[in-house]
Amino acid sequence: MRPVLRRTAALFWLAPWLALACARPAPPPPSPPSVIVAPVEVRDVPLEREWVGEILGSADVDVRARVSGLVLGIHFAEGRLVEKGALLFTIDPSEQQEKAASAESNVAMARTGLAKAEADLGRIRPLAEMNAVSLRDLDAAVAERDAAADQLAGAEAMLNVARLQLSYTRVEAPISGLAGIANVRVGDYVSPVAANSRLVTVSDIDPIHVRFFISEAEYLDYSHRFGLPKGEESDEPGRLRVLLADGSVHPQPGRVLRVDRGVDPSTGALAVEATFPNPEHRLRPGLFARIRAEVETRTGALLVPQRAVQELQGRYHVFVLGADDTVTLRPVSVGPRVGELWLIDSGLAAGDRIVVDGVQRIRSGMRVTVAAPAAS
């Protein structure tokens, strides 16, 4: 019986302490989490798209050797502007001069032959009229005169070709533009069929052109809303801008100049060429650039901060604050991003308040405390 008495005595002494513990009040429930909310922003938003393109000259002309010979001189400043018709190279004209001289000799001989044939015909024709010579002799004299005339015409044609070839020894700029670095040096032997036939490239860089590729869907969307580009007379609904590799923006806006005839079936892309004024010659052929275009203006667009949007398995949600300070997780359909904001296509309405900070601490149906945003 002694162990039982001991347990009874212990319970007797613990009873007051147990009574005090049961009499203590329960701890207060945790306070609602604090969040920062913001109203859905409503405004007109211009929507832009970007494509990667390559800068080209409005005309890129390869100046090539059209006759063979040694390069005797380079007469332009490489990497500088040249005028149309300016002398760029001289090629040794000796061979072409010899050909021209030979052609001139042939022309002289042909003229002599024609003069003789005409004189013979002039003597035979009166005799034939008097039946002093046969008609066969007259026909032969006429044929010789005609053959001599044809020989003279052929010799003169060959002389023109020789003179033309001789003129090719003076290589002139075909257009006004920026000349590149010459591919040959003085003393090099050039030929129209040799690898060094391309002497230099001259590019017209004002205006400059940019070629880029758009998808089939973008082309169809653009043509449905704005119609097809109309070349030089087209009035584009959205002007184009060039963004360079260093992040700078070319100050001159551009427009679509031409669209390729068809979509490349291997890539599903369509080539588009745009033109941009380039008075300072800042843009050079071969540069890569991004083309930015304003494709439409969304009127009364709904915008929310990107940090307020949660994505899970390709679906997007935001927390919307109700009138009783209870948040609800609402699915939304998002559009393009506009800076740090996200355009909402559906799921929200003007006047809705959304949680922008503190979304990690809440769940749908929870009551929250709205905190004032920190002063910026």
Image (cartoon, rainbow, N blue to C red):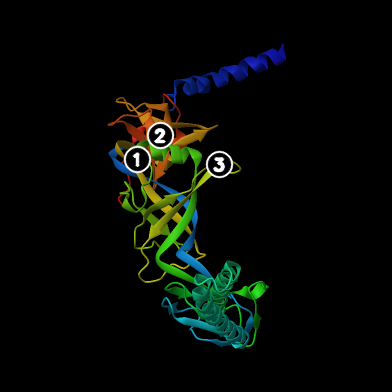
Find disc 2 in the rendering and name its residue: 33
The disc labelled 3 sits on which kind of residue? Gly
What residue sits 38% from the left and 63% below the top?
250
Q: Amino acid at mark 1?
A: Phe
Q: Earlier in the sequence, mark 2 or mark 3?
A: 2
Q: Residues within 10 Å of mark 2 (few under 14, many from 20)?
A: some
Q: Position of residue 350 (x, y in %)?
A: 28, 31
Residue 64 quadrant = bottom right
Spatial CA span between label 1 and label 3: 21 Å
Q: Amino acid at mark 2?
A: Pro
**SS at mark 3?**
loop
Q: Is residue 47 above or below residue 73?
A: above
**Marks 1 and 3 in Cβ contact (< 8 Å):** no
Give residue 174's position: percent from left, percent from top. 46, 73
Place of residue 164 in the rendered image (x, y in percent of width and height, measured from the top left): 53, 77
Query: Going by the picture, which residue comes out furthest to the top?
Result: 1
- For the residue carrying disc 3, how many other residues have a C-alpha within 10 Å: few (<14), some (14-19), or many (20+)? few
